[in-house]
């Protein structure tokens, strides 16, 4: 499908330079970039859901101290990845 977009001149120059250096069409670059952003947002959303689930597990306090520590470490990493 064809579309029209407006892009800053400097950004377009950077995109074109990248495409030329990597032998890919501009449309492929733009489609791939858009897909990457969408997938990253989906992943961030899933990380946030996982973090909420881990918080609920920790709140029930059915875990050992070692397990709670591991949950906290995982939550820390999920928070970093979802920012």
Image (cartoon, helix red, strand yellow):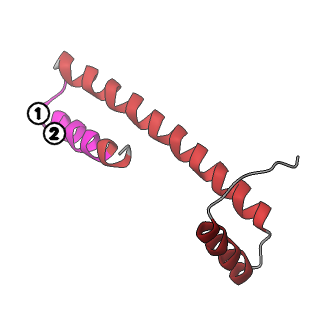
Residue for badge 2: 69
- Which of pointers 1 and 2 indicates the residue nearer the eye? 2
In the rendered image, residue 50 lying in the magenta stretch gets the answer no
Toward the viewer: 75 or 38?
Answer: 38
Toward the viewer: 44 or 16?
Answer: 16
Where residue 16 is drawn, which disc sits there?
none
Residue placed at 22% from the left, 41% from the top?
70
State whether residue 17 is above or below residue 75.
Answer: below
**Residue 2 visible in this rendered orientation of the protein:** yes
Q: Is residue 68 left or right of residue 52?
A: left
Callout count: 2
**Residue 62 visible in this rendered orientation of the protein:** no
Toward the viewer: 13 or 34?
Answer: 13
Do callouts 1 and 2 mark residues in contact (Cβ within 8 Å)?
Answer: yes
Inter-mark Cα distance, 1 to 2? 6 Å
What is the residue that sits farthest to the bottom in this orientation? Answer: 21
Q: In which quadrant is the C terminus drawn?
A: top left
Where residue 65 is drawn, which disc sits there?
1
Regarding mark 2 in the picture, which secondary structure is present there? helix
Toward the viewer: 63 or 38?
Answer: 38
Q: Is residue 46 left or right of residue 83?
A: right
Q: Quadrant of residue 74?
A: top left
In the rendered image, residue 67 lying in the magenta stretch gets the answer yes
Start-end of magenta stretch: 63-77
Q: Quadrant of residue 59?
A: top left
Residue placed at 77% from the left, 73% from the top?
24
Q: Quadrant of residue 28?
A: bottom right
Position of residue 18 measured from the top left corner of the image (x, y, whole percent): 65, 76
Crowd tier of the residue under label 1, counting other residues whose Cα lies within 10 Å: few below 14, some 14–19, many 20 or above = few
């Amino acid at each position: 499908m064809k579309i029209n977009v407006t892009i800053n001149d400097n950004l377009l120059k950077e995109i074109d330079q990248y495409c030329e250096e990597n032998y890919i069409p501009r449309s492929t670059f733009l489609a791939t970039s858009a897909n990457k952003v969408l997938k990253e947002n989906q992943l961030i959303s899933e990380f946030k859901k996982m973090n909420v689930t881990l918080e609920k597990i920790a709140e029930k306090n059915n875990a050992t101290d070692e397990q709670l520590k591991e949950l906290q470490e995982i939550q820390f990493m999920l928070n970093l990845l979802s920012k």
